Image (cartoon, grey):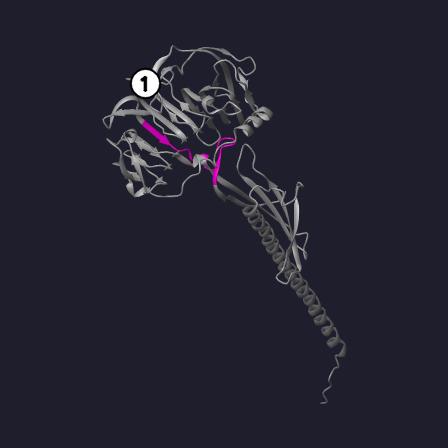
């Protein structure tokens, strides 16, 4: 039998074409995948580089502020935004960043900087960063004074304490107690039976491991509030009360309004001693007053207000908002400076940082004879720019407890309590408590003085909508 082989040339050709087509489709798919992966890698690189460029913008302006702390216009006199080239190590333009700067104002010491970055290779890919810088306010201290201080055994202080003089600490502290002096002369006014040389911080108080001396002096002159500027701010966007009669009484209301009264007469004069030990005969208590027609049941114009009083002012009530009250007579005459008198409890509607009160007196901040209750609470950051925060010595007038939630900043000697023979209370409050308000460190009352350098408060990426 003869075998015959059948030729299949056409079948082989078809299989070749089929497999070639499959390989072609696969190759195109692989090429597309590779191309997509390449584009994705390039997009990721551009996304990452845009962030680096944006961050370079923030770093640049931080450097700029270190050399020009009050320049918020990038070395120009023009408003922003400001665009800068970002160079690679060889000096070629790698990308650009755009800076938008929100400067501090009377309501906040904080600076907000936004930096948007992109690369020259992918200008459509942008990333925006925002950073907030702030300076610590002077209200970061629970207590600070330009002279010697004495805390008695019944005094409790929660927060930083500093004196440019010496500190006799018999009370209780839970934070640092610092003095700018290695030693100082303690007198009878500061609890020594005779003048003695003492360490910068000394006494019978606990937690003496938190005591430190000497430390850097706090320059009160550099921190002096510009009263003329505050007057201008109050006149333009706040409340300005000119000198009239015996002064004003401002009562804060929980609904965000205030009642302003004109003081027409004071209680009968009584004998007292001031912080210099000088005997006086007078009164710091209101007897009669009448509503001010312009500012009675008056809604505060914003949640950030400066009230400048060109006279003495009495203050009490419940604070709703962010307010600074200033008492000053300008131009300034040393023997004719103005005071703030605590007329009763001053409370915040909420102790969450939304409600804050600054009290800035050209001379003294005082607690008077009649008006102050037996248990008094003051929610405020207080500055006695040239004088003292204190209660005068009213012989044999003793009250129970005073509590301050905020800060006491006093140029001269401070006291709520007068004692004899070391610890026997003869006038003022038996118990005193001072609790610093942590919200005031970077969120102080309007136009409160700041200390220290700028610190980063917040860093975040802003997503464009």
**Residue 112 appears left or right of 426:** right
The residue at the point 54 percent across, 16 percent down is 295
At 54% from the left and 47% from the top, the residue drawn is 66
At 28% from the left and 32% from the top, the residue drawn is 187
Residue 357 in percent (x, y) is at 47, 27
Q: How many marks?
A: 1
Q: Quadrant of residue 4?
A: bottom right
- Of 449 and 142, which appears nearest the observer? 449
Q: Position of residue 255 (x, y in %)?
A: 50, 21
Foreground of the two, 112 or 336: 336
Q: Which region of the structure is painted magenta?
A: 432-451
Query: The residue tagged with tag 1: helix, strand or loop?
Result: loop
Q: Is residue 92 above or below residue 319?
A: below
Residue 119 visible, this orientation: yes
- Residue nearer the viewer, 427 or 146: 146
Residue where numbered disc 1 is placed: 394
Decide: is 327 above or below 352. above
- Whether the magenta-drawn stretch holds residue 211 is answered as no
Q: Residues within 10 Å of mark 1 (few under 14, many from 20)?
A: some
Quarter assignment of residue 406: top left
- Check the image and report above or below for 4 versus 150: below
Estimate the x, y position of residue 336 in percent, counting from the top left: 47, 21
> Picture quarter containing residue 304?
top right
Q: Is residue 176 visible?
A: no
| Residue 259 position within the rendered picture, expressed as x and y whole percent measured from the top left | 50, 16
Report if residue 436 lies within the magenta region.
Answer: yes
């Amino acid at each position: 039998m003869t075998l015959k082989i059948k030729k299949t040339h056409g079948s082989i050709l078809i299989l070749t074409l089929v497999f070639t087509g499959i390989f072609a489709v696969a190759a195109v798919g692989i090429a597309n995948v590779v191309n997509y992966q390449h584009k994705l890698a390039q997009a990721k690189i551009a996304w990452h580089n845009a962030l680096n460029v944006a961050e370079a913008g923030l770093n640049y302006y931080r450097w700029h502020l270190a050399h020009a702390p009050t320049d918020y216009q990038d070395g120009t006199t023009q408003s922003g935004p400001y665009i800068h080239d970002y160079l690679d190590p060889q000096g070629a333009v790698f990308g650009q960043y755009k800076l938008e700067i929100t400067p501090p104002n009377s309501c906040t010491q904080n600076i907000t900087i936004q930096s948007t970055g992109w690369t020259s290779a992918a200008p459509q890919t942008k990333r925006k960063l925002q950073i907030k810088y702030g300076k610590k306010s002077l209200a970061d201290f629970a207590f600070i004074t330009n002279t010697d201080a004495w805390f008695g055994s019944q005094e409790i202080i929660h927060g930083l304490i500093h004196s440019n003089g010496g500190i006799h600490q018999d009370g209780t502290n839970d934070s640092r107690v610092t003095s700018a002096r290695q030693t100082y002369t303690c007198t009878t006014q500061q609890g020594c039976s005779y003048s003695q040389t003492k360490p910068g911080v000394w006494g019978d108080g606990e937690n003496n491991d938190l005591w430190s001396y000497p430390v850097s002096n706090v320059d009160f002159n550099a921190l002096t509030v510009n009263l003329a500027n505050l007057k201008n701010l109050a006149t333009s966007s706040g409340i300005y009360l000119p000198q009239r009669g015996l002064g004003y009484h401002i009562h804060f209301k929980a609904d965000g309004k205030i009642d302003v009264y004109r003081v027409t007469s004071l209680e009968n004069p009584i004998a007292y001693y001031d912080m210099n030990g000088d005997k006086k005969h007078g009164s710091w208590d209101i007897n009669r007053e009448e509503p001010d027609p312009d500012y009675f049941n008056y809604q505060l114009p914003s949640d950030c207000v400066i009230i400048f009083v060109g006279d003495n002012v009495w203050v009490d009530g419940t604070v709703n908002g962010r307010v600074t009250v200033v008492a000053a007579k300008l131009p300034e005459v040393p023997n004719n400076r103005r005071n703030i008198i605590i007329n009763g409890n001053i409370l915040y509607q909420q102790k969450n940082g939304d409600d804050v009160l600054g009290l800035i007196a050209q001379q003294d901040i005082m607690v008077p004879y009649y008006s102050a209750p037996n248990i008094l609470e003051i929610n405020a950051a207080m500055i006695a720019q040239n004088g003292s925060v204190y209660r005068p010595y009213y012989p044999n007038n003793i009250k129970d407890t005073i509590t301050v939630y905020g800060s006491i900043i006093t140029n001269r000697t401070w006291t709520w309590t007068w004692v004899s023979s070391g610890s026997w209370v003869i006038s003022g409050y038996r118990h005193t408590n001072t609790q610093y308000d942590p919200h005031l460190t970077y969120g102080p009352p309007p136009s409160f003085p700041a200390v220290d350098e700028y610190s980063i408060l917040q860093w975040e990426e802003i997503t464009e909508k």
